Image (cartoon, rainbow, N blue to C red):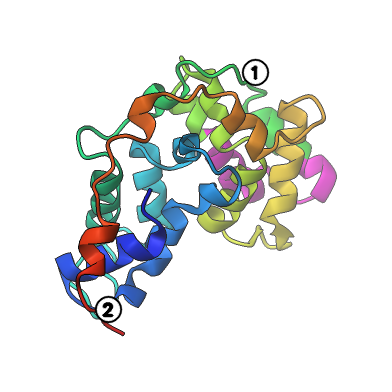
Amino acid sequence: MANPQVHARSSARKFGGRWQEFIEVHSFMDSSKLHFAKATHRALLHHEFGVELAVEIFGDCGRLPGTLAAINDIVQQHLSEDFSKVTPTVTDWFSESTFETKPAIGLAAACAESVRHFGGSPEDYLPVHEFLDSIEARYPDVPAAWGITHSTFGLGLCELVVGWTVGPREVPSRTVAEKHILLQCGGVIPSTYEVLDAIPVRPWMYNQATALSKELDKEPVTV
């Protein structure tokens, strides 16, 4: 299983520049492994939704300094190295998951609850609630996928996507997200471990990776 630096060195070879210019993107893509050291950690970001999140976080058409690579191309390179055949979808990852969810509370109710707690107007908190519920809106038939955003991992994603604070009152986005998840999940915030442990490990999750480490060890490291 390649680590972020191996992917970054591969990016430098493919797109030019230094590996340090790519490490932040690849570290983000593999950040889920910090929470769960099985192949199923990839269920959080190694799919089409993860690609969109990376582009949103690092820039629409953004290009890294010193390189000619767009963020989308860098992420697609990462996925092609982890899955040399076909990159799995959100549905592929979560279709067998036993992670339990509850009916969605809806954006209006979530915003109203935020106003009750923090003041201001519903529009102040809409970006947080829209982000958290975006997974439900896209994958209504795969409710277990809600764990991507409705979890401790999702709290970190929310800060990266929405920013540290929301609205003119500068309410911490994490606090708003915590209230949303607590309301949605019956008073608890599911841990990343709970979400990923509910996914059964299958061979396709780990046996398609490109053999990069040995190949790259033959090459000098550009610093």
Name the element at disc 2. loop
The percent coordinates of residue 216 (x first, y second) are 23, 65
Q: Which mark is residue 221?
A: 2
Q: Amino acid at mark 2?
A: Val
Which residue occupies the foreground of this view, 70 or 170? 70
Q: Earlier in the sequence, mark 2 or mark 1?
A: 1
The residue pinned by badge 1 equals 100
Q: Observer-nearest residue: 158 or 9? A: 9
Choose top left, top right, bottom left or bottom right for residue 55: bottom left
Residue type, mark 1 in image: Glu
Q: Position of residue 88 (x, y in %)?
A: 32, 30
Left or right, residue 158 beside residue 178: left
CB of mark 2 within 8 Å of CB of mark 1? no
The quadrant in which the C terminus is found is bottom left
For image coordinates 55% across by 54% down, the residue present is 162
* Residue at 42 percent of width and 52 percent of height: 29
- How many callouts does the rendering have? 2
